[in-house]
């Protein structure tokens, strides 16, 4: 006898589910599977029906994407300045800016993402390490010996350098002689990224985000950008 084919169509889907029956023994019944897109549409429709009926669904709250930028201002010291917490007169000083970064993160509410920090000056640097006072003195002294300020750098020959805008034909009297500061900044780097997990910076127990002043005293800015999901 001829077989009978029964076709069913899932709501909102273009894939039909079919099965074949016969009055006599024959091949086992077969069903075609709906596409993943169809399954997702059906799941959304089910959640919508449940919501309209006041029922509770198991779907999670949707997180939103956050992008926030803010400057951290650091007042630094130098040859004419006083002694900072982790720096001494001489142009090189180190500052722990982790608390400021954490404060900005807390304001954004980001739970998972990344924070990018960048120094906006060519004679500064950023690094991640232990901000222990005696270690900071070691670093300051080591950098001063590694790249001595007294070396005859070409950058310091003001009479041979082009005068940039906005200066008018003459260098200002207070133009710094600071080639060593630029070189140390290149060696250390001027940006860092730190992951954010569960609303906190992913740093080791003794790690801090350290801003390095190489030609103080100055008013410096560190750009802090936080990206992620709240």
Image (cartoon, helix red, strand yellow):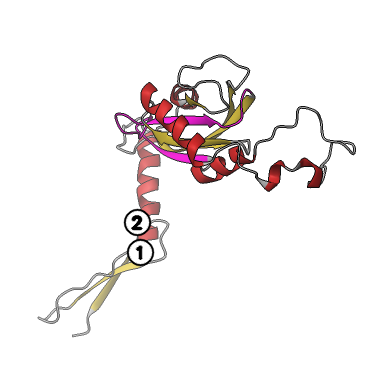
- Find residue 35 and name its label: 1
Q: Residue 66 at x, y = what percent?
A: 51, 35
Q: Which residues are magenta?
A: 191-217
Q: Residue 112 at x, y = what percent?
A: 40, 37
x 9%, y 81%: residue: 25
- Find residue 165 and name its label: none
Q: Are marks 1 and 2 in contact (CB under 8 Å)?
A: yes
The answer to whether 48 is drawn above or below residue 21 in the figure is above
In the orientation shown, which residue stands out farthest toward the right?
Answer: 169
- Find residue 39 and name its label: 2
The residue nearer to you, when weighing 121 against 222, is: 121
Q: Residue 62 at x, y = what percent?
A: 42, 37
- Looking at the figure, which quarter contains the C terminus? top left
The residue nearer to you, when weighing 127 against 104, is: 127
Mark 1 residue element? loop
The residue nearer to you, when weighing 114 against 17, is: 114
């Amino acid at each position: 006898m001829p077989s009978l084919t029964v076709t069913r169509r899932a709501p909102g889907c273009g894939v039909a589910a079919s099965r074949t029956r016969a009055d006599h023994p024959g091949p086992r019944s077969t069903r075609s599977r709906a596409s993943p897109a169809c399954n997702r549409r059906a799941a959304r429709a089910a959640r919508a029906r449940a919501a309209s009926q006041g029922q509770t669904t198991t779907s999670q709250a949707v997180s939103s994407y956050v992008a926030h930028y803010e400057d951290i201002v650091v007042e630094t010291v130098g040859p004419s300045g006083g002694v900072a917490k982790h720096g001494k007169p001489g142009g090189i000083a180190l500052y722990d800016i982790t608390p400021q970064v954490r404060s900005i993160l807390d304001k954004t509410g980001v739970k998972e993402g990344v924070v990018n920090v960048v120094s906006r000056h060519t004679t500064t640097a950023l690094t991640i390490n232990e901000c222990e006072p005696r270690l900071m003195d070691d670093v300051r002294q080591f950098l001063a010996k590694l790249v001595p300020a007294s070396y005859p750098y070409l950058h310091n020959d003001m009479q041979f350098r082009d005068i940039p805008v906005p200066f008018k034909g003459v260098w200002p009297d207070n133009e710094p002689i600071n080639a060593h500061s630029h070189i140390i900044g290149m060696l250390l780097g001027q940006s860092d990224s730190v992951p954010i997990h569960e609303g906190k910076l992913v740093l080791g127990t003794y790690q801090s985000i350290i801003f390095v002043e190489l030609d103080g005293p100055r008013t410096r800015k560190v750009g802090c950008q936080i990206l992620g999901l709240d």
